[in-house]
Amino acid sequence: MPKISDLLKKIHVTAILSLTMALLFSGCASQNTAIKPTNSAEADVETVTVIDYAGREVSVPANVQRIGCLYAFSGHVTAMLGRGLQIVAVVEGLKRDKIMNQLVPNISKSAVPQKAGAINIEELIKAKPDIIFIRSETANQAGEVDKINKSKIPYIVIDYKNIEEQQYAIEVIGKAIGAGERARKYNEYYQRCLERVREKIDQIPLDKRVRIYHSVNEATRTDEKNTLPADWLQIAGAINVSLDEDLKLIEDKYFASLEQIFLWNPDMIIANEPKAVKYIQSNKQWSALGAVKNQKVFQMPIGISRWGHPGSLETPLAVLWTAKTLYPESFQDINMNEEVKNYYREFFDLSLTNDEIIQILNGKGMRAPK
């Protein structure tokens, strides 16, 4: 993949003259207008060119009306950018997110043309997307790419390994669906959150920082170095015990043995999945671990997505929450109830009740089971 700095220099937007001035003005209409048929005679003929994660220059219609999100992260971003009602194809996981379904009720009826990594091209074509977002793991499978190419549906590869690349992914999605300004504002907020935390973490000596074990979805699944969770946990001031260690790799996921976790003996455990938290707290094999005995096992919040998950949009909130959880005395000025309330109101136009805010912060009941 090209360096992000190189990609940013190469991005450009090209416009082909529209047939009439009337069509030009119609192309500038609000992004919340009703969905037009893709074969409408009034469709805007402008195109936008972006450079995706794979370094491909991709031209898509400037007035995209039907969007396929074959990566859950792209669906969350599309909803955040105000284009959720244009989503016509999804992965199954998006249908399990409680707030996502509240914001984008059409998700429940959207096509699911990809299961177990394989695309059902007939179902995808039937959904008639103008554009689709896919992960690099799909783009790396020649057979899957061949299916998409034969359908002639433009696709953009969306992926990332760190904070900088995640912000770039948000920018690419924004430009591709005509919401570049909203994407820019989100990334500005994202960066402000990081700076708020860095300023105080820099004042905490390394030998005073909290050693944490981060459980991802499953009790023994954790973080490898050079990943997004490794990135944001470092900014939050955590000493992540699993980094620079030999982990077991299974289908692009990293696992530690329970014996290794006992050797690490972390001060605290944070987990993004309620089932994992319950397992760690109740399983006898974990009971002798210091963090468990000292009741230092914490469920991370769950909103649009599971905070702290490698595919989570809410990384800036995860940084704020983790920093305050690890160092409450240093972050007394951060009120997570207010942060949550303002975040969802600002970026999702969602007014949450106090009970809903508490439910998000507790991280329970926010996702339907598989």
Image (cartoon, rainbow, N blue to C red):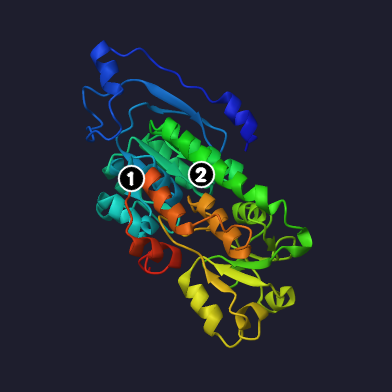
Nearer to us of marks 2 and 1 is: 1
Q: Hey, which quadrant is residue 219 in on the image?
A: bottom right
Q: In this view, does 276 lie above or below 101?
A: below
Q: Position of residue 82 (x, y in %)?
A: 34, 40
Q: Which residue lies at the image location 49% right of the left edge and 47% below the top edge?
A: 135
- Mark 2 element type: helix
**The disc labelled 1 sits on which kind of residue?**
Asp
Does residue 110 appear left or right of residue 228 in this picture?
A: left
Q: How crowded is mark 2: few (under 14 residues within 10 Å), some or many (20 or more)?
A: some
Badge number at residue 349: 1
Q: Work out how far the residue at label 2 is from the one at label 1, CA to CA, in angstroms.
A: 33 Å
For label 1, the SS is loop
How many residues crowd mark 1 within 10 Å: few (<14), some (14–19), many (20+)? few
**Residue 322: assigned label:** none
Residue sitting at x 36%, y 58%: 92
Towards the viewer: 146 or 217: 217
Which image quarter holds the N terminus?
Answer: top right
Residue corresponding to mark 2: 139
